[in-house]
Amino acid sequence: MSKMNRRNFLKTTGGAAVAAGATLAAPTIANAAAGKVVVIGGGVAGATTARYLKLGNSALDVTLIEPKASYHTCFMSNEVLGGHRKMSQIEQTFDGLKSMGVKIVKDTAAGIDAGAKKVKTAGGSTFGYDACVVAPGIDFKLDGINGATESMFDKIPHAWKAGPQTALLRKQLEAMPDGGTFCIVAPPNPFRCPPGPYERASLVADYFQKHKKKSKVVIIDRKDKFSKMGLFTGAWKNLYGYETDNSLIEWRSAASTGGIESIDAGSMTVETLAGGKEKFDVINFIPAQTAGVVASIAGLTNAKGWCDVDKTTFESKVHKGIHVLGDASVATKMPKSGYSANSQGKVCAAAIINMMAGKPVGTPSYVNTCYSIAGDDYGFSVAAVYRYNKEKDIIAGVKGAGGLTPGDASAEMRRREVEFAYSWYNNICKDTWG
Amino acid sequence: MHKSMTYALAAGVLFGLIGVSSAQASDAEASMLANTCNGCHGPDGVSQGPAAPTIAGMNKQYLVESMKAYSEGTNRKSSIMQRIAKGYTEAEVEKIAGFFAGKKFERVAMQNTDSGAAGKGKAIAKDLCESCHEKEGFAAEDYPILAGQMMPYLKNNLMDFKSGSRSIDNNPNMSDKEKRKKKRALADLMEKHGDDGTNAVLNFYASRK
């Protein structure tokens, strides 16, 4: 018999499939008692949650508080540093959220009264809520390194929150004379975007190779290994002469330097235990990180500075009615990535809608997909499909699924990974900000 | 009998017996499972481009077969989907495929197509492709929608058919007659019409609005 039975299948069961699909397409709740949700932060986690709350129940009153007029994505900001992309190509507006009825308040959340269920802003406004979503991203921890202050970032950018800092670092790299050395101080775990510093090194090396051949990237790491390490070092060998005398990239482990003693913006030096003071032409200091400051003001952080949550709803373990997600949360074993934040936003929105309707929160499903671009037509990725594991209280990757691009992937596969990385960017931004 | 029960049974009889996923079964809702795909394939499976395909409005069974082929990794290779597809059970894939099949295939991505090439491609497509990819590639009844699909995606897949990394011979969902027909059409396209003709057909389908 002919095996092409897609049409017959559709004809005999299509109607039932549509009907089943419709009932399964919850949580779209018509006539649900409308509630008020205040979202703090217009990054990936906050914007995705706001959008999916509205998609799930358009009657919900959703307010998003964000100090910036638009959001520059950290993902693809390394392409700006490498000169492959303009700042405007990593900028996302809040117009899409506004058009679906999310109220955008340009202000800074200054505190949360969990008892009275109110958010206060720096501008003096107060917003009452039934559920509050806290998605403040990260802040920096400067202790432990002599000379490190907030004011140094005007000269030694972190460029780890995209925007003016990204533009500043690009400007410095453009102004750097050929033959100069660019130093990336890479942060200790855990931090936002684990492969980010190494993608940054790759794309700046690509820029040097094309425009400043005598220049070099030095990564002084505060770790002994890093995300996608084999794939990055493989790419560096293939593209940038890694581990040869003419390598465009040098990576120094924490063990090899003995750790960082000081960073000085005046003399443009980084001091390590083993190497003493070393002068660089451009320094990118990516500090150690904690949850965004509003999380600690609201008392949501643990001793390590991150927020413990119920991993099926992202509701804080400290305060009921407050959900924390994205980089600020402890979502073991999901990495602090843009795709994680987007995925968590959908889980959180569905949970809030169901909780407000007095329904069970439902079974969550999560995914992470993270692309890195190491050079022209040279991309790779890591992916995972996750389920909540109740016994271990972790968001566990499904065994046998996910993982890295194989180290021996063909040139064609690496080229496609770049194509898919660009698709990833367009689609995740549309899915997040509308 | 409840309609969805009939559906589940039909699905079980036709497709449930092939292959076993290592993923744990879950009772997650279709939207919860499907929404995890949007970050790469676009909201509701409508891709903003440039390369990841739109999966909205596709034939449900085609989506199920694709996920199964990726999961097994033998007759359809992919840089990323091989790793993702293994994360879902057959029952979950059914839900995800049903969800996206129920959405509308929209053509929103900015695709820079060449109108001259598209015109040339129209005639070739009518001759070689139309009998399966009906209605100038808009049809979804039997075969995947080509009209308005992302051009790099279409190109990659033609390349994979040619190299055999997307195997027609080993596709368990095609009859021998279909396999012969498809291989003949692809050979005609690539050998008789060459790179120019192939490029023209890609431009034709990508330009359909």
Image (cartoon, coloured by chain):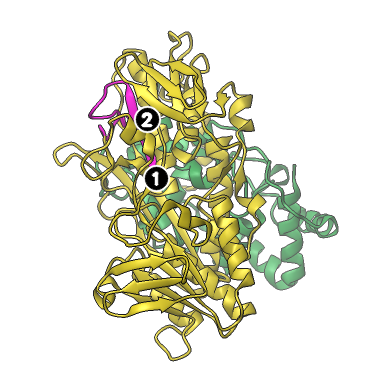
Residue A138 is labelled as 1
Given the image, what chain letter belongs to the residue carrying mark 2?
A: A
Residue A324 lies in the magenta-colored region: yes
Residue A112, how many percent across, how many down? 36, 24
Q: Which of A129 and B32 is in front in this view?
A: A129
Which chain is green in the picture? B
Q: Nearer the viewer, residue A245 or B171?
A: A245
Given the image, what chain letter belongs to the residue carrying mark 1?
A: A
Which chain is yellow in the picture? A
Q: Give the range drawn in magenta.
A: A309-326
Q: Hey, what amino acid is under mark 1?
A: Ile
Q: Residue at x 23, y 45 (%)?
A: A304
Q: Nearer the viewer, residue B196 or A44?
A: A44
Residue A348 is labelled as 2
Q: Residue at x 72, y 71 (%)?
A: B195
Residue B116 is drawn in which quadrant? bottom right
